[in-house]
Image (cartoon, grey):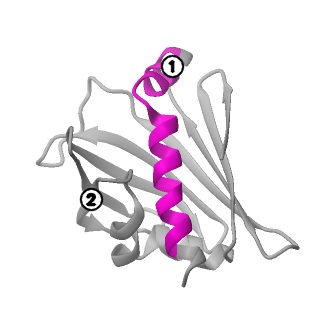
Amino acid sequence: MSIQIDENKIIFTRDFKATAQKIFNAYTDQSLFEKWFHPQGATTEVYKFDVQTGGGAFFAIRAPQGTSYTVTQYNDVVEPQKIDYNDYFADKDGNIDEKMAGMHNIIHLTENDDGTTTLQSTAELPDPKAAQQLLDMGVEEGMNSTFDNLARLVENN
């Protein structure tokens, strides 16, 4: 995985030995999403999952160091190339944590001639300080670990 910082944006890029459709399905099928969308050693529990333009999700990631809750609002979902969404830290009841910056994320999937698909995930935060806070919280390590889970899911099926 490569990571690029551009002011208030963190851009993650990784190639997978899978079709764009398989990766898209991993993001949009609840049973698949729960299998990979967390760092290694953690689990994901979904309470609401409606991945479509105008839809939303609410889930928990349970890790040894604690549980985090996320509320997601989907802006634009285009199968199988794009998922544009906002996500927010939340409490256990799904109330958005106003003290933490929300993130605008765009997932782009591009199939390559060699049978791989490039996933580019852009996380846009309100300002460079919020982006740095996320980096300081270990987002790069977490994304690497999470994308390793995704690779195992889509490349072996």
**Magenta region, main secondary structure:** helix
Q: Can you give x and y, in whole percent of width and height, for residue 155 in the image?
A: 60, 75
Q: What element does badge 2 sit on? A: strand
Q: Which residues are magenta?
A: 129-153
Disc 1 packing (10 Å; few <14; some 14–19; many ≥20): some
The reply, left or right, for residue 66 in relation to residue 87 is left
Residue at 30%, 49% (x, y): give it.
Answer: 71
Q: What residue type is disc 2 on?
A: Thr
Q: Quadrant of the C terminus?
A: bottom right
In the rendered view, tell whether residue 82 sits above or below residue 141. below
**Mark 2 = which residue?**
43
- Say whether residue 65 is visible: yes
Q: What element does badge 1 sit on? A: helix
Is residue 61 one of those drawn in magenta?
A: no
The reply, left or right, for residue 110 in relation to residue 86 is right
In the rendered view, tell whether residue 22 sits above or below residue 78. below
> Badges 1 and 2: C-beta atoms under 8 Å apart?
no
Nearest to N terminus: mark 1 or mark 2: 2
Figure quadrant of residue 16: bottom right
Figure quadrant of residue 55: bottom left
- In-front residue for pair 134/130: 134
**Mark 1 = which residue?**
132
Q: Can you give x and y, in whole percent of width and height, for residue 113 in the image?
A: 88, 73
Residue at 85%, 73% (x, y): give it.
Answer: 114
Residue at 36%, 52% (x, y): give it.
Answer: 72
Q: What residue type is disc 1 on?
A: Gln
Residue at 12%, 46% (x, y): give it.
Answer: 92
Q: Can you give x and y, in whole percent of width and height, for residue 61 in the image?
A: 26, 51
- Say whether residue 50 is visible: no
Disc 2 packing (10 Å; few <14; some 14–19; many ≥20): some
